[in-house]
Every structure is written in structure tokens, then in C-alpha cells.
Amino acid sequence: MSETISGKTILITGASTGIGAAVARDLAAGNTIFVHYNSSRDAAETVAADVKAAGGTAHLLKADVGRESDCAALVAEVTSRTDVLDVLINNAGGLVQRRTLADGPNWKLVDEVFRINTYSVFYLTSALVPLLTAADDPSVINITSVAIRSGAPTAIAYAAAKAAVDTFTRGAARELAPKVRVNAVAPGVIITPFHDKYTPPERIKAFVDSTPLQTTGTPQQIAHAIRFLIENRFVTGESIEVNGGMFMR
């Protein structure tokens, strides 16, 4: 493990399971980690315990990031505990429900998907700029998805919401430069509770069959990409594709 990331204060949204939990554990040693969760309290407490066991400090934060009031409360809680935020990792998100266009319009579903995946990123990044700019080498890392490249049939709202975050990443990178770096990671098919809930085994097999490396990814591999973006001070406005070759550019 690299020793260059230490003494930092890091907020990870959606950190109770999956990618967020892996990132919290990977960055734990010597750092202060804000472990955000919504409903998975027990899992979040396990992550916090692992952070402490690795030599870090952990604070639990509960919030539904799809609600403006909860985002405001989350920011207030972070601000009450620290004057500086070195890293913001906007990882929280969700597909919510698979649905085809032929099923008919569902404004409520689209709104929910965008609130969780997109509005939260806009709100939290903007609200935390004062804490980020107080840091020596602040970094924002947004989690998007290979879905923004594939179109994601039956999950078009999710793909569109993540695509908005991809565009936001580049705009924020320019707007917040040179003080704050803003990047993104676009995971491919990563085996987490996300896919346990929304993707049946036959669809996973189809993904693997269409991937040049013929495998799915792990949350730890995404954590490694995030670590790289935190460490490299000459990268901003970039989106790193970690998808086994499913999408190439």
C-alpha cells in the first residue's frame, strides 16, 4: 500500500457496502474517513470498525442523498467536525428500478434516479467547496458507470444520470482549477450488492462474454483507481474507465 495518502480527511458517500466500503478500507490507514450510509447501519459500523483497526479514524454519517435537506444536514455534520476536507468521493447512487421505454413514462422514477445519482453530486460538491479549498491538495472523485457508454437498455435513466455526472466532472474540473482537482472513475460490471439486486446471473454472464478480459471486476480494483487519482497531482477532468475492456476509447 502506498504511504503517500496519510493525514487526510476523506468523505465517501455510499460507503457501507460495495465500492464505497472497499475505498474506505483501502484509504483507512492514517486518515480520517467519513463513512456515509443511508439504510445499512450495521454494514457501515463494520466498515468504521475496519477503518479504526487499520489505524484510521472513522465517523458515521446517515443521510438520504436523494433529499436536499439530508444533503444539507450531512454537510453541516462534516463542517462541525473538520475545517478541511482533502478528498470528496461521490460514490452514492442507485439504479432504483429496471424499466423499458415501452413501459410508458414514469416521471417519479426518473426524478428519483437523478436525485440520488446526479443532484447529490452537484449539491455536495458545491456545498463542500469551502472545506475543499482549505486543503493543500484537494480532490473530488465522482463514480460514474460504463452504462454511460453502452446506453444501458432497461436502465436508461440511470445511464443518463451518470452521464450528467461525467459532464459535471469536466465542468467542475475547469471551474475549480487550479485549487481543486476533479476526476471520475467509470466502473464496468463490479460484483457488489448493486448487481445482486438488479442483475440476474444470465445478464452477468452476457456481460462477461462481451468483455475482452472475460471477467467481472472487484470493488478493490475501483479503489485502486481512486487511489491513483488522489495521488497524481497532474490529473484533472479525467474519467478513468475500469471495465475489463467492455468499453475502449
Image: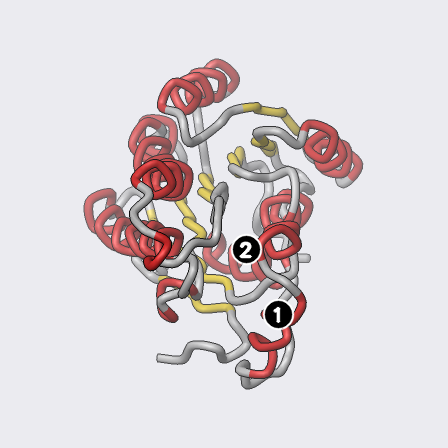
Q: How many marks?
A: 2
Crowdedness of circle 2 by 10 Å Cα count: few (<14), some, many (20+)? some
Of circles 1 and 2, the one toward us is 1
Judge left or right: residue 91 versus residue 148.
Answer: right
Quick check: 14 above or below 104? above
Image quadrant holding the C terminus, namely bottom left
Pick out the residue farthest to the right: 53
Q: Nearer the viewer, residue 137 or 209?
A: 209
> Residue 17 at what x, y percent from top left?
65, 43
> From the viewer's perspective, is 17 left or right of 244?
right
**Residue at figure coordinates x 47%, y 53% from the top left:** 98
Image coordinates for residue 114, horizontal then vertical, percent: 34, 42
> Residue 244: x and y, percent?
55, 76
Marker disc for residue 227? 2
In the picture of the structure, the residue carrying the numbered disc 1 is 204
Q: Position of residue 152 (x, y in %)?
A: 41, 65
Q: Earlier in the sequence, mark 1 or mark 2?
A: 1
Q: Label 2 near label 1: C-beta < 8 Å?
A: no
Q: CA distance from mark 1 to mark 2?
A: 27 Å
Q: Nearer the viewer, residue 86 or 243?
A: 243
Q: Residue furthest bottom?
A: 212
Residue 243 seen in the figure? yes
Q: Quadrant of the N terminus?
A: bottom right
Instruction: Give the amino acid type for the residue marked by disc 1 in the picture.
Output: Ile
- Can you see residue 138? no
Q: Is residue 92 above or below residue 222?
A: above
Q: Residue at x 57, y 51 (%)?
A: 4
Image-quadrant location for residue 2: bottom right
Q: Residues within 10 Å of mark 1 (few under 14, many from 20)?
A: some
Q: Secondary structure at mark 2?
A: helix
Residue appearing at x 32%, y 31% in the figure: 123
